[in-house]
Amino acid sequence: MTESEWRALMVAAQSGKGEAYRRLLTEVSLWLHRYYVRRLPAGMVDDAVQEVLLAVHEKRHTFDPAQEFGPWLGAIARYKWIDRLRAMKAAPTEELSDSLAIRDHGDAVQDARSLEMLLARLKPAQAEVIRLVKLQGMSLEEAAARSGQSVALVKVNIHRGIGRLAALVRDQADDA
Amino acid sequence: MTHDALIDRLSEGLKPVRRRRLSVDLLIVAVICAVELGLFFGMGAARPMPMLMPQPSFWWRLGSLGLIAAISAALTILSFNPVYSPRRASRWLLAIGAICLAVGFLINAGPDADKNLIARLDWPAGLQCAKKMILLSIPAVIGLAVLMRRGAPTDGRRTAWLAGLAAASWGAFVFVFACPFNDPLYIAVWYSVGCGIVTAVSRLILPRLTRW
């Protein structure tokens, strides 16, 4: 679907046309799925997609037909993504599920490369424990033994590292 | 709930929405400010104004605060659009604030410089000034918070900071018409205290109230 088709559907939706809105949301949900599958653990993708659909619904009056729909949707998707990253940072490390590991399929290669570029901008100690715990699925104790850091330091480095990742993503988004 | 079920629920009974318009938001804020200013003058609170008008510092305060209020209010309203990021503009705003402060010291380099610091700061009067500035900024804070809640800011913290700064500088702008003090040190300290409190409180509270 082209940008102008998306925009036309959104304008129709703002006028109360339910069928156009249904088509738009269906397309949007597919786009969002592709967007989040590269950026979030598999277990979080569906929730994130639905959260953005609800946000699009609540904030549809803020879309300006003079602007493009793609950047508007992208900004909302990014906002919710950063929210999720913050929530991951706030959640206790022990309770995060194993599904945080990157899925092993073709698209993941590209995703892993992007993630590596971000991790390379963290302090080595932070990047190492995030790789061990969040990507390879090790326990805190295993990561501590492997990295030579104490368990408490592993927790602190994961917490700070994820916070820094969120800030980097936000900065990149702002600079884009 | 599956995506399809959610989409069905959202599409059924869809109602038309009134689009958010930048000009309407600006107009709402302008009306709130105009009403407040009208009430301020109507209640006779600007009585010292004729005495203040010949002083360069009066025009400096009015110009600086008016400029900061106008720019920050415009940036705040722009930030309600999810696509707009106020990050770079906020830095420029800080630079403008610093320039305004420097200009104030240049045009009015301490008429009371011979007094000691405590006397120049005049604590009791300064606290009263800060309190009045805070009270005068409340209508603008409320107006911007309501608009922010209706909008879709994607940088909630920075937008809240900008909204607080806009409201604070507007409150201080209105207070200039009633403030008889001329010492740049007094103005820099107590106006910063008043504006700083409003800005900090807005930065802390507004993101929670306007989260979406």
Image (cartoon, rainbow, N blue to C red):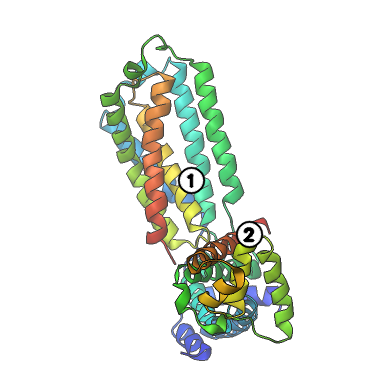
Residue B144 position, x and y percent, is: 41, 51
Instruction: Report helix, strand or loop for mark 1.
Output: helix
Does residue B41 appear anywhere in the picture?
yes
Q: Is residue A134 left or right of residue B151?
A: right
Q: Closer to the observer: label 1 or label 2?
A: 2
Is B167 drawn above or below residue B1 in the view shown? Answer: above
Instruction: Report helix, strand or loop for mark 2.
Output: loop
Judge the density around disc 1: few (<14), some (14-19), many (≥20) Cα neighbours within 10 Å: many
**Residue at x 61%, y 77% (from the top left corner):** A135
Residue B73 disc label: 1
* Residue bearing the label numbered 2: A123
Residue B48 position, x and y percent, is: 31, 20
- Callout 1, which amino acid? Ala
Residue B137 position, x and y percent, is: 35, 41
Is A122 drawn above or below residue B74 in the view shown? Answer: below
Q: Is residue B185 left or right of residue A47?
A: left
Q: Quadrant of the C terminus of chain B?
A: bottom left
Quadrant location of residue B39? top left
Is A102 drawn above or below residue A148 in the view shown? Answer: below
Please name whichever residue, B119 or A113, is drawn nearer the observer in this view of the structure: A113
In the rendered structure, the residue with mark 1 lies on which chain?
A: B
